[in-house]
Amino acid sequence: MPALFSDSAPPRSILVICTGRIGDVLLATPVLRSLKARWPDVQIDMLVFSGTGSVLENNPDIRHVISVAPRANLARRFVGARKIWRKYDLGCALRTSSAASVYCWMAGRKRIGIVAPSGKSWLRRLVLNRFVVDRDQTMHVVQSGASLMSLLGISPCFTVAPPSVGNHPEQLEQLNLHLAPAAGKPFVVVHMYARYAYKLWHVDGWKELIALLHERGYAVVLTGGAGQDEVNYARDVAKDTGSEVTNLVGKLSLAATAEVIRRAALYVGPDTSVSHIAAATGTPTIALFGPTNPVRWGPWPKDWTGVSPWKLSGSGQQDNVYVLQGLGACVPCQREGCEANVHSRSDCLSALDANHVIDAAAELFDIVHDKRKRIPIIVEPFMSARGGTDQRQLRINADALVSSPGVKLPEATHHSEESLSSGEPLEREGRPV
């Protein structure tokens, strides 16, 4: 197969299209790094849905971020795409959606992309010069992007690039002020909230985890977005823990959040984009997974290369990341919770107690536990992010650590976007990130 570009005539401009959620955009950054490593002088722009471009802040491989409305109809997409019509030597579509294919066809004089295996993708295949077929249940999304590089004769890079505050003294000074209450102590970042209720761990688990971390001499820093539900959730948990926490929920950009996580001894969070950011920083990361397929969507450890680091079922560690799956033979069911909708509970997460998280932290740091005993733990009714209450009460015999000075985690080391159309709420595409 002849090369799309010769060494004497490399592409001068590339548009990478990733019309997905924040986590999708973050996990597309290895493609940017691969292209830039092969052609250092190429100018790379990235087209994303409105509200997701902040995860690319200070990414050194990008010239511009172009935002488009996720719910735009075909007519509006054509109007917006006039600004990018055949402007790029290469268009690269990282999503199998019709939106990604349309923008790729309009922007690139040559075009490559990922297509779904079903026969319904025949039209999308027609608009691409070359394509790879996605294997979305058996291949990690980072691998999917890397597979495109074979169409260009490029050795893929697998490094996920988290957002960064860069070298901005005023931002770093503001961060230091935010973290002042935790000064002098190693701290753990606890990110409690997920966008969808079926990914949420229970409130009692977060409270007990925070208490256990305090017992072991750690400060706790809460992170999260600015949505009112998320702010209220964190405020209520912080108020009820009986321990002092540094609550930064709603106060940080994604780049600032990444910087806080970089400084932490440990990060704990659910199946959400910030857990992917945490993994990419290199900080020891515990990600709580319930129904989601980790083979496809598990956090990508820093500097991991090649195939997916995760198996379908079973908790475990790869490099700086520990994926802790919920409890139950059905895990992962790969549905949106037990009731198959985004507001649903997930019993596998409801049955997971805080001591499992502490166990995971000890294993992550290769710490040998003292002997443990069985104690009954009451999990109170689960309150969903949407205000619905699951009236079930679960009584669980959980493995609990005996508090001991011999079980101690290591101390921390103290150390432009443009828009084609107006922003709208991000479309739910049924993907877990």
Image (cartoon, helix red, strand yellow):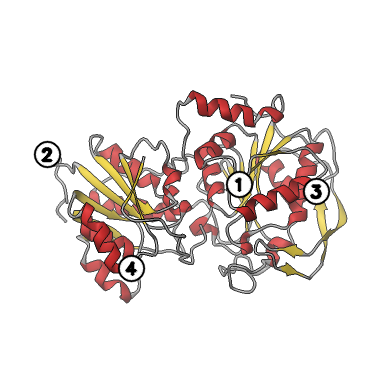
The residue identified by callout 1 is 224
Using a 10 Å C-alpha cutoff, classify the residue at mark 4 as few (fewer than 14 neighbours), some (14 to 19) or many (20 or more).
Answer: few
Amino acid type indicated by mark 3: Asp
The residue identified by callout 2 is 8
Q: Judge whether residue 305 can be spotted in this image.
A: no
The residue identified by callout 3 is 240
Disc 2 or 4, which lies upstream in sequence?
Answer: 2
Q: Judge whether residue 167 can be spotted in this image.
A: yes
Amino acid type indicated by mark 4: Asn
Q: CA distance from mark 3 to mark 1?
A: 18 Å
Secondary element at tag 1: loop
Residue at image location 61% in from the left, 39% down from the top: 284
The image quadrant where one finds the N terminus is: bottom left
Amino acid type indicated by mark 2: Ser
Q: Residue 225 or 410: which is nearer the viewer?
A: 225
Disc 3 or 1, which lies upstream in sequence?
Answer: 1
Q: Residue 279 or 89: which is nearer the viewer?
A: 89
Q: Residue 297 or 372: which is nearer the viewer?
A: 297
The residue identified by callout 4 is 73
Residue 344: quadrant of the picture: bottom right
- Looking at the rendered image, the disc whose residue lies closer to the viewer, 2 or 4, is 4
